[in-house]
Amino acid sequence: MKIITFRRGIVLVCIGLITSFGFSSFNKNQKTIWGQNLLDSLTESQKRETQNSLKGLKLHPDLEITTFATEPMLQNPTNIDIDSKGRIWVLEAYNYRPTNTGNPSNPAGDKILILEDTNGDGVADSRKIFYQSPDLNAPLGIAVLDSMVIVAQSPYMWKMFDDNHDGKADRKEILFQGIGGEQHDHGAHAFVFGPDGKLYFNFGNEGKQLLDAKGKPVLDQDGDIIGPNKYKQGMVFRCNLDGSKVECLGHNFRNNYEVAVDSYGALWQSDNDDDGNKGVRINHVLPYGNYGYKDEITNDGWQVNRTNIEPEIPKRHWHLNDPGVVPNLLQTGSGSPTGILVYEGNLLPAAFQNQIIHCDAGPNVLRSYPVKNNGAGYSAEILNVVQGVNDQWFRPADVCVAPDGSIFVADWYDPGVGGHQAGDQTRGRIYRIAPKNHPYKVAKLDLSTPELALSGLENPNLETRYLAYRKLQKLGAGATKVLENSFATNSNPRFRARAFWLLANGPQGFNYIQKAAEDANPDIRMTAIRAMSRLFPIGQWKKLGDKLVDDSDPQVRRELAIALRHNSSPNADKMWTKLALLYNGQDRWALEALGIGADGVWENRLDHYLESIKTLSAKPTGFNDLMWRARSEKALPYMAELIKADGNLDQKLAYFRALDFIPGENKHTLLVDLISNRFKNDPASQLVALRHVKLAVLQSNPAAKKTLLALMAKTSNELDFLELVEKYELTEANPKLLKMILEDKQTRKAGQIIYKLQGGSELIDKTFRTGNETAQRAI
């Protein structure tokens, strides 16, 4: 549905070959995948038939894949969820982008289906329509939470309610609205229930804003309007179950399709590059971070030239060399990333346990990304679950965990993705993946006692955990003993974390946070920091912070740095300084966490930090990096030292670029001084410095402008020349621009610029009126 260029002509011949299959038209006992030699014996139309749905797939050897449902039971699935009964809820998108595709649409609207295996043979034989309406057109997100079903479809995020539990929606309410991206893949996406009792969700870069049910702008955690004045592009959010207390947890993604939350409260996402630039990425989301799709200062795209630009396009795509951009966990190349989860079950093999599992519809693959700790951050590799090696129509759109620990994959099944196109409207499949000899069986959920409710909380299925969480929350003191026991003794740290979140949200929450902060497991200590910073003011957790600041684990220190964000208290300054002094100068994750922790209070942070190092015989190891990351004029003298120092210009480009992010006017005075003095005889450095002087300063400084014009006269790089002319509105360049047009050198760009400049259009008109046919053709 995204990214890969759609090649319509080669596939439309296949559309219309579908006949009226029954709901169980495939071979229920077919569990093997055929090789290429057997596929070669099939015609193209036979390959698309449901009985052959598994034959083009290459599966991990320790797993088995079975077909749960196919067309005509469902078509065009975009998103799924699985309830505690093991039923598969499916969003259909027959009415997908009709103005783009030219495909017919159903005036009755799209459907939300409930598919169920009622006889235990592993195949869906029951199909209910939970909701169908003309207002449902290509929805992209669904979350099933007992009688409440949250559906995301720009411009709305709805809560639908099945009040009498008959499998039909009885009423619908607006949760949020005003979200951009109607009939667009980059709009509103799915919600998930977090271990802390909150909802998490996101939207892509068409979303732009959130309005509440009454149409009023939603305010973020700082009391600011969630919109483009503060945030850029795609965003990820957290809120209460009723939609209150919305927090924006990250921004400047392109199309972050879904968010997955693990039991510790850590967030994981994928993001989609501009089509075809091999820049698809997986992110660990540091809360409140900037993820670099657009230039933070200018809002320019990645293609626009900048100092210290990344040499590789996939990295350039995310402005990774800029201060203030959180690093990527992994870049996976070209793709169309969609559904994602963190698998916390134990049915799948160990290689997949506690790891991300992710759909990428572009390269026809469902993958896992085994994550390893790497300093304050993480690294990851790729491990395929299943790939359509011999079936390029396999388009995994979403993946969910069932109550038994198996996973289900929704297959959009289409000849292509990208450009909001769809070559097929009639097909769609749901597959189940599990180890061999593990048929699909879901026990009836029993939450009648605290012990049984705790067992439900430990289930890998999200709705089961939601029901158990709510039951344990309702039990209150009656559940405390079992939760305390799980938190204290459970051998699975993720189960301990789930129990902890309930305890931390209770009346004695701070006592449990204190215990968690002293736990031997760093993941539990990080969970404690996340809870304490959300639930209690810093004055209450200062003593804990003072202990955690010296934690041996860099990831724990990372979380503590983030917890200090926007806190201007002296306690926060002291903690931040201690953390900054422990920064080793090698860990970008730690550096960006320190930057988040200083956001909005850089003056306070640097005052305390610089005062604390006055008595040191040498600057701390990470000092230069901290000044590079700082957003304060207090960092300017140190940037000046680094730029003035002897050394290769390439080694200084990062420091020149950092000047763009330092507020105030003094940096321009520094740059003019560098041009006139330190780099007087160094034209290459002069040109770099001039790129960072703002227009008003250059126009008011004849000497600097003269230097720039002299340098431009010598440059042989036409694109550099045009960039500088446009940036500094250099009317003196009009004659050369005209010459470039007449000589057919960068004609389009030169023409765009000359018409913007004073006197440019007059020069063009005058030249045209000379009657010179060659000039007239060029113009």
Image: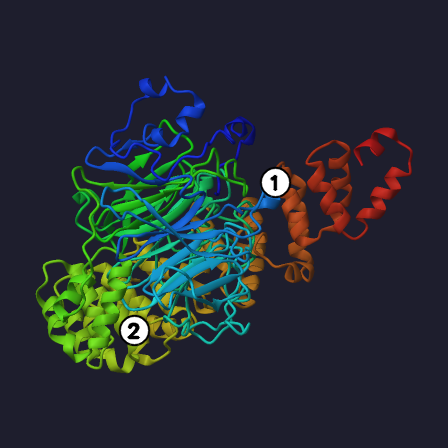
Label 1 sits on what residue type? Gly
Above or below — where is 772 with respect to 410? above
Instruction: Report x, y in % for residue 450.
Output: 14, 71
Q: Tell which of 344 and 29 is nearer to you.
A: 29
Q: Residues within 10 Å of mark 1 (few under 14, many from 20)?
A: few
Q: Quadrant of the C terminus?
A: top right
Instruction: Report x, y in % for residue 667.
Output: 53, 63
Above or below — where is 56 with respect to 163? above
Which element carries disc 1, helix, strand or loop? loop
Left or right relative to 568: residue 407: left
Q: Is residue 701 visible?
A: yes
- Which residue was labeled with disc 1? 102
Residue 592 image-quadrant placement: bottom left
Instruction: Report x, y in % for residue 567.
Output: 36, 76
| Residue lying at 38% horizontally and 20% vertically, measured from the top left | 42
Which element carries disc 2, helix, strand or loop? helix
- Which residue was labeled with disc 2? 533
Label 2 sits on what residue type? Ser
Instruction: Assess whether mark 2 and mark 1 are in contact (beta carbons under 8 angstroms).
Output: no
